[in-house]
């Protein structure tokens, strides 16, 4: 049965083929500057006394439609960082999330020292090299759309390029895809087939993850008490976008949220 995830991935693969024709991989590889060290999100999440919030800039989504089209990435992400976010995330998929590499670049320029995650569907190694060219600190690998061998290969490439990897899981069947090289493991509480949210997803999979892994709960978090609870259970990171972006001023919403945490 076809799902929205299948549709997104198929579309992303087509887009990458077009990108390759316009700008070949060799051309991107030739202009990447590896001398600039990237920021470490995993280090930030290990620091005591930090919020652990990874605040996301997301214009829209397949499940919610338009969330916020009236704000600019540089303003919002700078506000997130000033509010105490441990890291930032920017959507770059245009067809389904209204994002772009221009959004990412705007956030990168204004936040040179804050860990920045490129949130996209990494279905081809071309996108890894493009991410490094964009000066991403972290890339997202989604277990549901990649084979175990691809996760291992993409992780190795990301590390060669100086980037960290966040592997996103959705259910128990994907645990066997965890590679020992992975920097962080995220549990997405949103079912990518029907986009329903269940926070119990984080708790159900938590004990199955490697004990020493950095664990991130993603999606569906809407109150500080939930973050406090998840932190007490062993999560170090909390990826949040819609809860802030649906506000008229996402940065203020983020500040208010973080100020109520008990860390």
Image (cartoon, grey):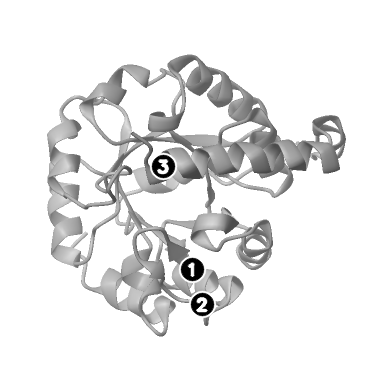
Q: Do tag 1 and tag 2 residues touch (Cβ < 8 Å)?
A: yes
Q: Position of residue 194 (x, y in %)?
A: 27, 48
Q: Find the distance from the CA under tag 3 to the CA under tag 1.
A: 18 Å
Question: What numbered label is drawn on residue 26?
Answer: none
Give me the disc on residue 5.
Answer: 3
The secondary structure type at the circle numbered 2 is loop
Quarter assignment of residue 74: bottom right
Please give the residue where the numbered disc 1 appears in the rendered image.
59
Image point 37% across, 41% down: which residue?
A: 3
**Mark 2, residues whose alpha carbon is within 10 Å: few (<14), some, or many (≥20)?**
few
Residue sitting nearer the eye, 141 or 7? 7
**For residue 211, side relative to residue 65 (left or right):** left
Question: Quarter holding the C terminus?
Answer: bottom left
**Front residue of 33 and 147:** 147
Residue farthest bottom in this picture? 248
Q: In percent of the image, x 43 and y 77: which residue is there?
A: 251
| Residue 141 place in picture, x, y as percent | 47, 34
Residue 175 versus residue 116 in the image, above or below: above
Relative to 131, residue 53 above or below: below
Q: CA distance from mark 1 to mark 2?
A: 6 Å
């Amino acid at each position: 049965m076809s799902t929205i995830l299948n549709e997104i991935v198929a579309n992303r693969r087509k887009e990458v083929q077009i990108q390759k024709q316009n700008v070949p991989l060799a051309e991107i590889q030739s202009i990447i500057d590896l001398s600039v060290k990237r920021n470490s999100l995993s280090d930030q999440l290990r620091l005591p006394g930090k919020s652990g919030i990874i605040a996301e800039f997301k214009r829209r989504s397949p499940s919610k439609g338009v969330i916020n089209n009236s704000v600019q990435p540089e303003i919002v992400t700078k506000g997130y960082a000033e509010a105490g976010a441990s890291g930032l995330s920017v959507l770059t998929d245009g067809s389904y999330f209204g994002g772009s590499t221009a959004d990412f670049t705007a956030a990168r320029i204004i936040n040179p020292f804050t860990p920045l995650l490129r949130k996209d569907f990494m279905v081809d190694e071309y996108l890894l090299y493009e991410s490094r060219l964009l000066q991403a600190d972290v890339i997202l690998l989604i277990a549901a759309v990649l084979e175990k061998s691809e996760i291992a290969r993409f992780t190795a490439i990301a590390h060669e390029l100086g980037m960290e990897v966040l592997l996103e899981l959705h259910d128990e069947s994907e645990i066997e895809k965890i590679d020992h090289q992975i920097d962080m493991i995220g549990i997405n509480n949103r079912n990518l087939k029907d986009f329903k949210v269940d926070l119990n997803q984080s708790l159900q999979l938590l004990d199955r993850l490697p004990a020493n892994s950095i664990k991130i709960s993603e999606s569906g978090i809407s109150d500080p008490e939930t973050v406090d609870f998840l932190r007490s259970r062993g999560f170090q990171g909390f990826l949040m976008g819609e809860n802030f972006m649906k506000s008229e001023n996402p940065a203020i919403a983020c500040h208010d949220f973080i100020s109520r945490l008990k860390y």
